[in-house]
Amino acid sequence: MSHNTWIHRLVRVGVRPLARTRVTPNQVTVVRLVTGIAAAACLAAGNYTFSAIGAGLFAFSMLLDRADGELARMTGKHSPGGHRFDLFADGFCNALAFLGIGIGLRDGTILGYWAIPMGAVAAASIMVNLWFVMAMEEVKGARSAELKSFLGFDADDATLLLPVFVLLGWDVPITIMAFICAPLFTAMASRHFTKLHKLDRSLYADLLQPRDAAPAAPARLQPADQRPPQ
């Protein structure tokens, strides 16, 4: 994710006053996580009023996702753990929102109860993509899996269309789109990152190796005149 998109610039105005307080980026991330979970719960209720509230909460949660990073950069209060927490909150809230929409469409729509597994597939794809990004950063370093922005927007900004679709009553189309596009995007992103960073089996082995495992000591070669007699 770029740090200078239009949404980041908008959020930056509201974050500057927080930089002079004791509020930490992780605290903002916690609020983002709570509002994201609340948004998903409202979206799962199955009626327009709660869906509209859920859409508003989701949009607010997305702005908080940008705000915690801006606050971290303004105050210098950033850490690898905080970055991973931010990544998890982002992916988890997005996945939960699509699952919530699917549950909310179980009655009174053409999808019926098929909407639940369709939302679950979209949610699972988002979480798999999150795992791949975190695994990539574990091997290649923080933010190595980021995509470049385009015209002041990045790929993650597309999730802001979710509350717009919900408010327009287009829950069914966005569920179908997410069911089809989320797995495709995850597969394409995985292929792109694999090709870009030339991941091979040795890198995956390094990723899966326990951190506290000491590397094997290289074998010491003895000079010919010091070899034990046969």
Image (cartoon, rainbow, N blue to C red):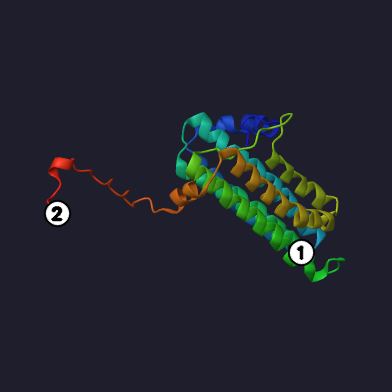
Horizontal relation, residue 11 to residue 118: left or right = left
Task: Say which residue label 1 marks.
Answer: 104
Q: Quadrant of the N terminus?
A: top right
Q: Are marks 1 and 2 in contact (CB under 8 Å)?
A: no
- Residue toward you, 71 or 80: 80
Q: What x and y, as percent, mark residue 140?
A: 50, 40
Q: Residues within 10 Å of mark 2 (few under 14, many from 20)?
A: few
Question: At numbered mark 2, what does the secondary structure look like: helix, strand or loop?
Answer: loop
Q: Nearer the viewer, mark 1 or mark 2?
A: 2
Q: How many marks?
A: 2
Left or right side of 59 for 174? right
Q: Is residue 131 left or right of residue 187?
A: left
Q: SS class of the residue under badge 1? A: helix
In front of the other: 171 or 132: 132
**Where is residue 133 shown, x and y percent of the image?**
57, 46
Residue 210, by quadrant, is bottom left
Q: Amino acid at mark 2?
A: Gln
Evaluate whether residue 42 shows in this view. no
Whichever of callouts 1 and 2 sits on the residue coming sooner in the sequence is 1
Residue 59, position as x, y percentages in the image: 71, 45
Residue positioned 66% across, 56% down in the render: 125
Residue 72 pos. (x, y %): 51, 35
Q: Residue at x 41, y 53 (%)?
A: 209
Q: Residue at x 65, y 53 (%)?
A: 126
Q: Residues within 10 Å of mark 1 (few under 14, many from 20)?
A: many
In what quadrant of the picture does the C terminus appear? bottom left
**What residue is at 45 percent from the left and 54 percent from the top?**
208
Q: Is residue 1 above or below residue 217?
A: above
Mark pair 1, 2: CA separation: 79 Å
Q: Nearer the viewer, residue 63 or 130?
A: 130
**Residue 63 can be seen, yes or no:** yes
